[in-house]
Image (cartoon, helix red, strand yellow):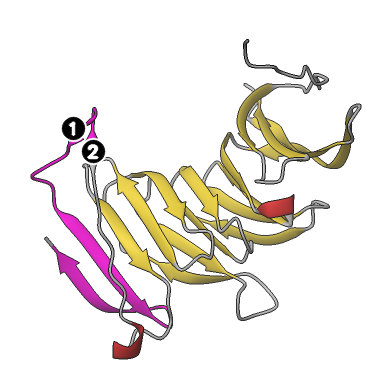
Amino acid sequence: TGVQTCALPIYLLGGNITSMAVPRGGGIVTVGTSRTTGTGQLYALSYTGTGFTTFYNATSVVGTSNDIACADSAVFYLEGRGSETDIFQLDGTLAGNYKTGGTINSVDISSSNGLWAISGGNDGKTYIFSKESSSSWTVFYQGDSGASIYSVAISDNGHYAADGRSDGKFEYISTNEDATAANVYSANLFVNKGGSPYSGQNVFITELSGGAIIANKTG
């Protein structure tokens, strides 16, 4: 017996598809396209069981869509396009727009609650956004400049995040605002490259309290 698959409808979009994301529960696909003209489109598509309907379609968006991430049910999704990070509601309402000093290479969002997001790119800064304690999205943390950031990740609840840089270094960040003795946490970090331990590299850990750095450790 083989693996059974179900052929679902194909939805044709214009331009080159350069980024996509599907939330954990499925049913929604967010898609970013780019064209040689320097503009593209952003889509939020809903699968109905027989085909797709369009929740949102932004035309003539400037820049290349480099990455998209979706929270569960796509209540919020964010796109890294050009040098900007944009956070959207499912209906396409722009909930936040953040300009940076370089191309955004990677974005992620806390999948379980959709209240935390992270992006990073060629300006070497990590940007963490939050809506957990306010009615609008704000920049919770902006890191110092460093080597270009190629990959970012954030936990389901948004309390822990990480970025990976072009020089082989990565940062592990806690967004817990009450970093007191009663809230001590520990983490084991395992770094592999090509299936083998990536030894001899520095690990830089930043601990935050209320958006401010309270401790840096390198080892």
In the rendered structure, does residue 19 fall within the stretch colored magenta? no
Looking at the rendered structure, the secondary structure element under dot 1 is: strand
Left or right: 158 in relation to 148: right
Looking at the rendered structure, the secondary structure element under dot 2 is: strand
Disc 2 marks which amino acid?
A: Asn
Q: CA distance from mark 2 to mark 1?
A: 5 Å
Give x and y (percent) for residue 33. 67, 29
Give x and y (percent) for residue 11. 81, 22
Give x and y (percent) for residue 163. 36, 52
Disc 1 marks which amino acid?
A: Ser
Q: Residue at x 64, y 80 (%)?
A: 134
Give the image quarter of residue 6. top right
Give x and y (percent) for residue 191. 23, 44
Q: Residue at x 36, y 84 (%)?
A: 183
Q: Nearer the viewer, residue 23 or 163?
A: 23
> Does residue 19 lie above or below 120 as drawn?
above
> Which quadrant of the rendered structure holds the C terminus?
bottom left
Left or right: 150 in relation to 45: left
Q: Which mark is residue 196?
A: 1
Q: Residue at x 69, y 17 (%)?
A: 4
> Which quadrant of the rendered structure holds the N terminus?
top right
Mark 2 vs 1: CB contact within 8 A: yes
Left or right: 199 in relation to 146: left
Q: Nearer the viewer, residue 61 or 157?
A: 157
Dot 2 surroundings within 10 Å: few (below 14), some, or many (20 or more)?
Answer: few
> Does residue 114 lie above or below 74 as drawn?
below
Left or right: 11 in relation to 127: right
Main SS category, magenta section: strand
Give the image quarter of residue 209. bottom left
Residue range in magenta is: 192-218
Look at mark 2 in the image and give the residue it sits on: 192
